[in-house]
Amino acid sequence: MEKENKKTREKARKERNELVRQLVAFVRKRDRRVQAHRKLVEEQNAEKIKKTAELRRQQKLQQAKMAEEYKEQSWAAMSELEKELQQIEAQYGEEFGDTSENAEQPNDNDPTIDCYDDLYCPACDKSFKSDKA
C-alpha cells in the first residue's frame, strides 16, 4: 500500500512540476519585462561581438605594421651564416687537406677507406656486419 501511495505521489509531483514549467514558459513569452531583458542581453551580445571583431582587426593591422617595420638582425641573416660556413669549410679543408673537390672523389691511397665497408658509423667509430646491427 505504501509503495502504491509513493508511486502516486511521485506521479502527481511530476505532473505538478511540468504544469509549473509550462506556466513559467507561457508567462516568459508574454511578460514585457522578460522580453525587454532578452532584448537588452541580445544587444549586449551584439556589442561584444562588434568589439571583439574590432579588436581582432586592430591586432591584425598592428601585426601587419610590425611585419612591415621588421628589420632582420645582422646576426640572424642567412647570408652571413652561409659565408661563415664556407670560411669554416675552407679552413678545415686547408687544415686537414680535405677540400670539397677531394671529398667527392675517393682517394685510393687512403688506407682507412679500405678497411671499412658501407656499414660504418662515424659517430660511434664502428663498422657493422648487418643493417640490423
Image: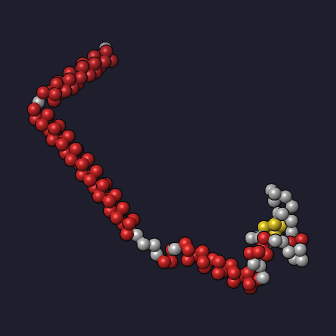
Occupied quadrant, residue 12: top left
Frontmost residue, 30 versus 68: 68
Quadrant occupied by the C terminus: bottom right
Residue placed at 84% from the left, 63% from the top? Answer: 118
Q: Is residue 103 visible?
A: yes
Identify the residue at the far left of this view.
32
Quadrant location, the N terminus: top left
Q: Coloring scheme of the render?
A: secondary structure
Seen as rendered, the residue at the extreme bottom is: 95
User: x, y (%) of residue 41?
Assistant: 18, 41
Q: Position of residue 64 (x, y in %)?
A: 36, 61
Above or below, comparing residue 50 to residue 33 in the picture? below
Please name the residue shown 74% across and 85% down the image.
95
Identity of the residue drawn at 81% across and 71% down: 105
Labels in figure, total: 0
Q: In this orientation, does residue 13 appear?
A: no
Q: Is residue 23 left or right of residue 130?
A: left
Left-right relation of 23 to 85 = left
Q: Position of residue 19 (x, y in %)?
A: 20, 21
Q: Is residue 67 above or below residue 96?
A: above
- Asked whether, in this view, residue 11 is left or right of residue 30, the answer is right
Residue pictured at 31% horizontal, 18% vertical: 7
Residue 131 image-quadrant placement: bottom right
Q: Is residue 16 above or below residue 62?
A: above
Question: Where residue 3 appears, x then y in whole percent?
Answer: 33, 18
